[in-house]
Amino acid sequence: MATTEISLILSIFLLLTLFNVSSSSTCSSPKLTSSFNSCNQLPTLSSSLHFTYNPSNKSLSIAFTATPPSASGWVAWGINPTSTGMAGTQAILAYKDTDGSMSVKTFNISSYSDIVEGKLAFKVYEKRAVYNSDDKSITIFATVENSGAKINHVWQVGPGVSKGFPEKHEFQTDNLQSKATLDLNAPDGGSSKAADSTSDAIKKKNTHGILNAISWGILFPIGAIIARYVRTVDSADPIWFYVHVACQISGYAIGVAGWATGLQLGSKSVGIVYTSHRCIGIALFSLATLQIFALFLRPKKEHKLRFYWNIYHHAVGYAIITLGIINVFKGLQILEPEKKWKSTYVGILIALGGITVLLELVTWIVVLRRKSNRSTKPYA
């Protein structure tokens, strides 16, 4: 059984490493392309940025195009003069009013909880917006003064506007990765470097997800199945124990690697916190570490404390499995991969669940037969 399961895990790992997140932004508008010197195909939110930079007066003329998630939604583009994230961004936002006209406003996003409409830190003029009824996109036109040759720019889309104020956008992968450094002297604004940076971040997130899915979500449950059911086979003793320990230690080692990549991602994503996913991850790491150390303190079978150690060991083990599976699903929700990847993991859990039910039935049959044989055995 162990060989089949290890092969299954390796196959899943190889399949998951092929997963990537793609974007589909274009710079194909002939009118915009002929009106601006450069075009940046932004890596997320199916958006693009046409621009012309004048180094003599440091003015930047832009045409930012994106499609809001709904007809009443908004799109925004901005410059962050102090950082690379959303907090601190000086943003230009546009949306279609109920009367069909276009509104363009400026917002100072000093923090994620403090968004103020008003003047920006730099001059903005000639701002307007155009709605394209063919693809439901919105294009923001504006000219910015004193931009500098390199800028940190941020773009975003949202679901709607309430009383002239933008509603919160989604916090999915595309929304959280909608930021880059723009090199205004480069023909494409340095879009190739930005794409490489985004691709690297996505690869790290995928690696984090793969490692944790294999460790907490697959190896630990398999180790528990081996400990509970294979041990009932007399000929499997003590092989079952070594296979069980190998599964759990391997799962822990892979889980530590996944936890470390999570910490690295967190340190590079200031202001972006998945609280429940993070807390469960910390709990998992703590419980698993405690479980590994408890292995070296395991009393002998005849010791009076062995009964209580078994209770502790089983309780912590099942807690790790439960929390691990929950956190894998939370991670899938954050990453938003193609539906087939979630379906694959659900299929693995169903398979492990089916194996568990079958082995539980077989185990009870074996135990009852042993009891029956003992009760019918004649006394000497």
Image: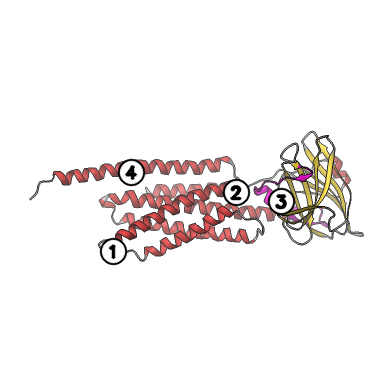
Mark 1, residue position:
300
Q: Give the mark nearest the N terminus, 1 or 3.
A: 3
Q: Which mark is residue 44?
A: none
Identity, as a three-letter code, of the amino acid under mark 2: Ile
Q: Position of residue 315 (x, y in %)?
A: 39, 54
- Labels 4 & 2 near each other (Cβ < 8 A): no
- Labels 2 & 1 near each other (Cβ < 8 A): no
Assess whether residue 168 is covered by the magenta stretch: yes
Helix, strand or loop status at disc 2: helix
In the rendered structure, which segment of residues is drawn in magenta? 162-191
Q: Give the mark nearest the N terminus, 4 or 3.
A: 3
Identity, as a three-letter code, of the amino acid under mark 1: Lys
Q: Give the mark nearest the N terminus, 2 or 1.
A: 1
- How far apart are the two marked residues, 4 and 2, measured between alpha carbons? 34 Å
Q: Position of residue 336 (x, y in %)?
A: 60, 45
Helix, strand or loop status at disc 1: loop
Can residue 110 be seen? yes
> Residue sitting at 48 percent across and 54 percent down?
215
Identity, as a three-letter code, of the amino acid under mark 4: Glu
> Residue sitting at 50 percent across and 58 percent down?
283
Q: Which mark is residue 360?
A: 4
81 to the left or right of 284 = right
Mark 3, residue position:
178
- How far apart are the two marked residues, 4 and 3, measured between alpha carbons? 49 Å
Seen from this angle, which residue lies furthest front? 163
> In the depicted view, which residue is nearer to us: 235 or 122?
122
> In the depicted view, which residue is nearer to us: 200 or 137?
137
Mark 2, residue position:
334
Q: Position of residue 79 (x, y in %)?
A: 79, 55
- How far apart are the two marked residues, 3 and 2, measured between alpha carbons? 15 Å
Q: Is residue 93 above or below residue 287?
A: above
